[in-house]
Image (cartoon, rainbow, N blue to C red):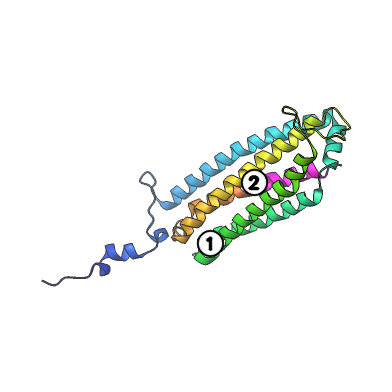
Amino acid sequence: MTSFPVENSGLGAAADRPYHETYRQAEHFRTQADEFDAVKLGVWLFLATEILLFSGLFVFYGIMRMLHPEAFIHGSSLLDWRWGLLNTLVLLYSSYTVASAVRCAQVGDQKGLQRNILITFVMGLLFLVIKFVFEYAPKYAEGKLPGFWYSYPNWESPYEPLWWGMYWGATGVHASHVIIGMGLFVWLYIRARKLHFGPKHYNAVEGVGLYWHIVDVVWIFLFPMLYLIH
């Protein structure tokens, strides 16, 4: 009886193909297009909750600045807008690289996909270094923390704790989102190295990319609100 090698069978051929080419949608979806649309809608719904979170901070900012403008103006004058601008440019470039990563997945450019994911991760790391080393650390060294209030010896308004509460709260929450995004990029990079993404399957790359764009957009609002009002 004649026998045939396993690699010549359909099963063997499928096993030799990368994951993104053999991917099949979940059983409760009719097609991969339906699954992609559902995943993208779910990501947008999640991002809507993120917008609501930061909207609360923006409302607090607006009310407090209207009530105590002198505290906010003086507090802002103690920030170095050059670091804020540099971080803005870093995040804008990272938005470009993450969009490039999505495009590379769509056209099957595996090297470009991995490279852009890695660059985006490095940009997130650079953002955090600037934030923690060149902004947070000097402020912490200059000030003091009596209880939950942050203070400076050159206060000009008794309401400046409201300003610093806004600054630490808004930038801290945003930084936590950057850290989460960096973790997601590590996960994407590991999967990209295993050829999990390609023209037929890139849901995760698209979803993480959308999340990162929201992180960028929020900072574009925070930069002028915090650094440029003086």
Q: Is residue 10 above or below residue 174?
A: below
Q: In the rendered image, is residue 36 in sight? A: yes
Sooner in the amino-acid sequence: mark 2 or mark 1 = 1
Residue 67 is a magenta residue: no
Residue at the image position 77 percent from the left and 44 percent from the top: 138
Q: Which residues are magenta?
A: 215-230
Q: According to the image, label 2 marks what residue?
A: 215
Q: Contact (CB < 8 A) between labels 2 and 1? A: no
C-alpha separation, residue under disc 2 versus residue under disc 1: 21 Å
Q: Secondary structure at mark 1?
A: helix
Q: Position of residue 199 (x, y in %)?
A: 47, 61
Residue at 53% across, 62% down: 114
What SS does tag 2 mark? Answer: helix
* Number of numbered callouts drawn: 2
Say left or right for 186 vs 166.
left
Badge 2: how crowded within 10 Å, few (<14), some, or many (20+)?
A: many
Given residues 173 and 44, the one toward you in this image is 173
Query: Disc 1 marks which residue?
Result: 114
Quadrant into which the C terminus falls:
top right
